[in-house]
Structure formats: C-alpha cells, structure tokens
Image: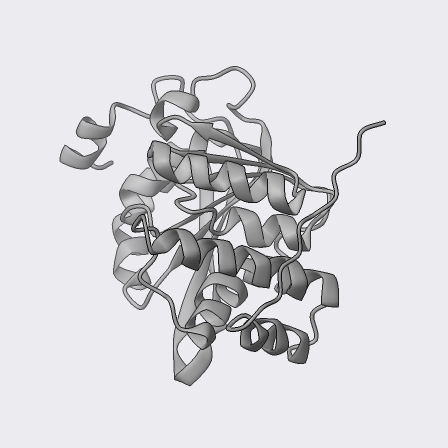
Amino acid sequence: MWQCSPYIWRGKGMDKIYGAIVKMGYPVHVAEKFSTYAQMLLTENERTNLTRITEPADVVYNHFVDAVSPVDLGLIHDGDKIMDVGTGPGIPAIPLAIMLPHSKITAIESVGKKVDFVDKVVDSLCVNVDVLNERAEKAAFFQNMRSSFDVVVSRAVASLPVLLELVGAFAKEGGLVVAYKGKGYREEAEQARNAAKMMGLRGPEIYDVKLGDGVVHYLLKYEKLYPTGKKFPRRYSVIKRTPL
C-alpha cells in the first residue's frame, strides 16, 4: 500500500512559530507540520499575494490558533466530515487537517493560483484535504456535496447574510455551520436572521477566541435543522444584490 511521507521543514525564522505552538501545549507533530506550512505560505507569498499576515507571532495566532479554535472548543471532532468554503491559501482547512488526521476535509476555492498552492501543501504535508477549484454557489448543487458535511466552516469570505446562503446547503441535517468573524459579528448576525431561517439553520451560538495582544475573534455556530430549499443558493450576483 502506498504511504505518504510528510516533508517537515524547521529552519531559521520558523523556530519561533514551532516553539510558540509547542509552548501552548500542542503536540510536536502538529507544530512541525504547521511551521512547515507557514514556511511554504510565506515563501510563496513573496511571489503571489496569499496573506498580509507575515510576522511569526501573528502567523501563530491568526493562521493557527484562530483556525483550530473550533477543535479546541469542542465544535469539531476528529473523524468529522468537514467543508471549508473559500479556503484561500488553505485556512482553516490545512490547520484543521493537521489537528484532525482522521477527518476528511474538502476545501473550495475559486482562485486557481490559491488552489495550486493548497495542492502543493497537501502533497507535502500528507494531510487529508481535497481542494476543489469551483465557486461555492455551483458546488452546492453537486450531488456529492449537498447536505453531506458534518461541519461547514468559512473564514473571511463574505458578510454573514451572504455567507449563510453560500454555505448552508453543504451541511447535513444535524450538522453545523461555523463562521469565523470579527468584532462586527453582532450586527451581521442580526442582518442574517432571515438567511439562517431560509437555509434551515438555527443560531448563532457565539464563542470568544482570544488571540494575542488582547485581540478577540468570534465563532458563530449554527445548527442545521432541516434541508435547504432546492433553489438555494442563488447566483452570487443575486445573493450580493439582494441578500435574504
């Protein structure tokens, strides 16, 4: 049987990231894989604009601690089938895959250069991620995608009324939608009440995620109670123009 041997890189500049993650109590293999991912991300970022976060401490908190916070809070468990909508350079999909070796993660991204980068990371780290170069509002109608996932996550993609329509159909009944949000989450959640209802979602429950230097991010958890209507999601231009 073919087995993958992960490429682990710990060199100058990544020791701070590796050390910080170990100091927080995460396993050594998690720190090794994430610091390798960070090195790949920052190296590629010199050629292609993938992230504005480049300082080691910021990378640890914004690209690791924030990304894996649903695991730390018990919202996601190893073995869950997970969808990451709008993964960008692989966040939160790659950190989640590092933490959850028995989970099957599907990551959707519409920008080809980002998909190519995530594919390289997946091959290098031997993590269980399938990345799909597609728009979420189209993939939501794929038979193997719709109502198929235990947990759907998304970070820095769209305002909540727009986001819930994009992602709601992916979650199975009894599953979760977890949105990563900043300090404006209350207003967004209020504006998204109708969208949540139309997608068959109940919530949100709010979880604080404390990052470095007093920065707090928020996880908004929605439960999928019943199937999303067959006509949703609509075309992206329509969703943006007339949010639910």
> Residue 165: where, in percent of width, then height?
34, 34
Res 216 visible: yes
Horizontal side of residue 159 vs 204, given as left or right = left
Q: Is residue 86 left or right of residue 239?
A: right
Q: Quarter holding the C terminus?
A: top left
Which residue lies most toward the front here?
A: 12
Residue 208 can be seen, yes or no: no
Residue at x 52% of width, y 15% of height = 143
188 sits to left or right of 31: left
Measuring from the top left, give residue 157's x and y in whole percent.
32, 46
Residue ID at (28%, 55%): 188
The residue at 50%/60% (across/down) is 39
Numbered-mark total: 0
Q: Residue furthest right?
A: 1
The residue sitting at the bottom extreme is 213
Q: Is residue 236 left or right of residue 124?
A: left
Residue 202 place in picture, x, y as percent: 47, 45
Q: Is 180 in front, or is 200?
A: 180
Decide: is 109 above or below 186.
above
